[in-house]
Image (spheres, rainbow, N blue to C red):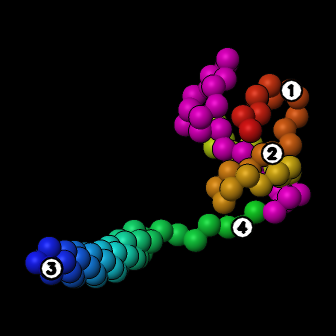
Amino acid sequence: MGADIRKKRKIKKTTEFTEKMKKVQEEAGMVLRKAQEKMKWEADRGRKRTEEWRKDDKVMLSIKNLVFKERLVKKLVDQYVDLYFINKVVSTNTVILQLPMVMRIYPVC
């Protein structure tokens, strides 16, 4: 008989403990979500909206990271070359262009 009372007390205490821990976890989750939202808001505050590109739009290709065999004076070279069509939109800031074979640029995607 005494063992049953002890078991019931232990069960009651463990259920109280688990309920308390669930409540603490829920509160912690809410606080984390709120902090996450605030961090996102702070980070997005200084960002610019990007243009949404579609297939067959024309864009200019930047030569900032291209290497040329005959390098002219960097100040005098145009920063962009011709308009090219977009073949595929990979993400908001990545597109695949339809480039001429003469350029010999390997398509990464």
Which amino acid is tagged 3?
A: Met
Q: Which of the two discs, 2 and 1, labels the residue nearer the N terminus?
A: 2
Disc 4 versus disc 1: distance between alpha carbons? 28 Å
Q: Nearer the viewer, residue 43 or 24?
A: 24
* Corner quadrant of residue 19: bottom left
Q: Which of the two discs, 4 and 1, labels the residue nearer the N terminus?
A: 4
Q: Which of the two discs, 2 and 4, labels the residue nearer the N terminus?
A: 4
Reading the image, the residue beneath label 3 is 1
Disc 4 versus disc 3: distance between alpha carbons? 74 Å
Q: Residue at x 66, y 44 (%)?
A: 62
Disc 3 versus disc 2: distance between alpha carbons? 81 Å
Select label 4 or label 3 by which is in front. 3
Q: In which quadrant of the rendered image does the C terminus lie?
A: top right
Select label 3 or label 1 by which is in front. 3
Q: Nearer the viewer, residue 6 or 28?
A: 6
The image shows residue 65 at horizontal and vertical percentages of 59, 34
Q: Which of the two discs, 3 and 2, labels the residue nearer the N terminus?
A: 3
Disc 3 versus disc 1: distance between alpha carbons? 92 Å
Q: Tell me: residue 106, above or below residue 6.
A: above
Q: Tell me: residue 70, above or below residue 63.
A: above
The image shows residue 5 at horizontal and vertical percentages of 15, 81
Q: Nearer the viewer, residue 41 or 61?
A: 41
Which amino acid is tagged 2?
A: Leu
Segment colored magenta: 54-75
Judged left or right of residue 99, residue 30 is left
Q: Which mark is residue 52?
A: 4
Q: Tell me: residue 49, above or below residue 9.
A: above
Reading the image, the residue beneath label 1 is 102
